Each structure stands twice: as structure tokens, then as C-alpha cells.
Amino acid sequence: MKLETLIKQSQSLIRGGIKITGFSLLVGIGAYIFEVFWLAKLACVVAGYEVLSTLPDYWIFRQIIFSAHLSMLEKTIFNAVHEKLQPREAELWDKQIAAINRITIASGGVKANFFVMRNGKSYFPSELCFAKRRRFKIAEFDIETNTGAATLHGRVWCVKGHVSSIEYGRDDSFREFERMAQGQWHVVRCQIVNYPA
């Protein structure tokens, strides 16, 4: 009787071991298949991004909306403001412009916002800020195409002592102006409204 019981227990343990081994094997195969599919999905995402980045509209969207590079028009405006400031203010102005690492464009192309981002948050170094910390309009400008076909009006704003945004006139889209100007424009007027010192 004892021998029969021992045989049954041994058979039961062997079957249990096979079940455990089979389960472990299934888990291992499942994990392998999941990893293969995950890598394939990742490869598709990367390939999709590569394809999208070759499309002109996507490239323009990415450059205008998320780029930290100033456009030629923005450089023209900031240089015009620089020329009207006092030497110490102009020096800080240039450092603020150089520190910008994120630019966003409001829908319709009527406003550009400028940021210094650090660790995912807006952070403008205090040593680059003007003494005047409230929100103020630093300058107004008019830029005209060299052909005289269009004029772009706008204002440059500061917040918390640093450059914050360029706002174009209500009916003025800088994109339309750039299209008409074909890179050929000149500053008609740039006036400092509030000195930042």
C-alpha cells in the first residue's frame, strides 16, 4: 500500500513539474512575442517619423512651431529694437535673444511667444532681466516689403523683465507678409515705447 501511494505521489509530482515547466515555457514564448511586436511597433513609429519629416508641410510646422531658431523676420525686428536701446539695455537685450530656446506661434500667425526652457519649465535667467519687471510694451514697429506691396505692423512685449512676445496687427499675419516679401523687406519705423531700465 505504501509503495502504491509513493508511486502515485511521484506521478503527481512529475505531472506538476511538467505543468510548471510548460507554463514557464509559455510565459517565455509570450514575452518573446511581446518584445518582437513592441520592437516592430517602435520601428514603425520611427519610420513614420522619418517619412513625415521629409514632407514639406510637416517640416515647416515643426520649424515654425517648435523651433528655437529665430526667423529672418524676427531677427529684423529684434535688431531694430536693439538699435534704439541704450548700450547697457542693448547688451541685455542681445543676451535675452540669444538665450531663447523655444518659440511658439499663435494660430493665424498673429503672435510669436519666446521662452527659455529648463527641465521642461519656463525659466528666464534673472541676470539677463531688465530692472522693470511688470508687463510692458517695449517697442512698436512697421516693416515694409521692398516693393511697397505690404506693410507689417506690430508690437514687442516684455514680461518679468525679459522679451516675451511679438504681436502683429489684428489683420496682419507675418506668414502672409513673408510670402509677399520673398525675404525682401526693410524697417520703416521702430519706436521704443517704454525703456526697460
Image (cartoon, grey):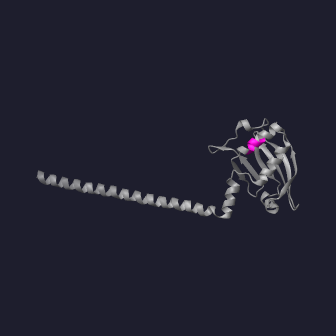
Name the chief secondary structure element in magenta.
helix
Q: Give the residue at the far left of this rendering.
A: 1
Which residue lies at the image location 17% right of the left edge and 55% below the top edge?
A: 8
Q: Quadrant of residue 151?
A: bottom right
Task: Please determine whether, in this image, residue 124 is positioned above or below residue 7.
Answer: above
User: Do we see residue 138 in this rendering?
Assistant: no
Q: Position of residue 17 (x, y in %)?
A: 26, 54
Task: Point out the stretch of residues depicted in magenta.
Answer: 93-97
Q: Is residue 184 magenta?
A: no
Q: At 81% across and 50% down in the image, what residue appears?
A: 77
Residue 55: quarter of image: bottom right
Q: Is residue 6 above or below residue 89?
A: below
Quarter of the picture holding the C terminus: top right
In the picture, measured across the screen, residue 39 lies left or right of residue 8, that is right
The mark tally for this picture is 0
- Residue 83 in percent (x, y) is at 84, 44
| Place of residue 141 in the rendered image (x, y in percent of width and height, measured from the top left) | 85, 50
Between 177 and 146, the residue placed more toward the observer is 146
Q: Is residue 182 above or below residue 99?
A: below
**Residue 174 appearing in the image:** yes
Residue 95 in magenta stretch: yes
Q: Residue at x 74, y 49 (%)?
A: 113
The location of residue 2, given as percent across then percent down, is 12, 51
In screen coordinates, is 137 left or right of 120? right
Q: Nearer the viewer, residue 34 or 63?
A: 63
Q: Residue at x 73, y 47 (%)?
A: 114
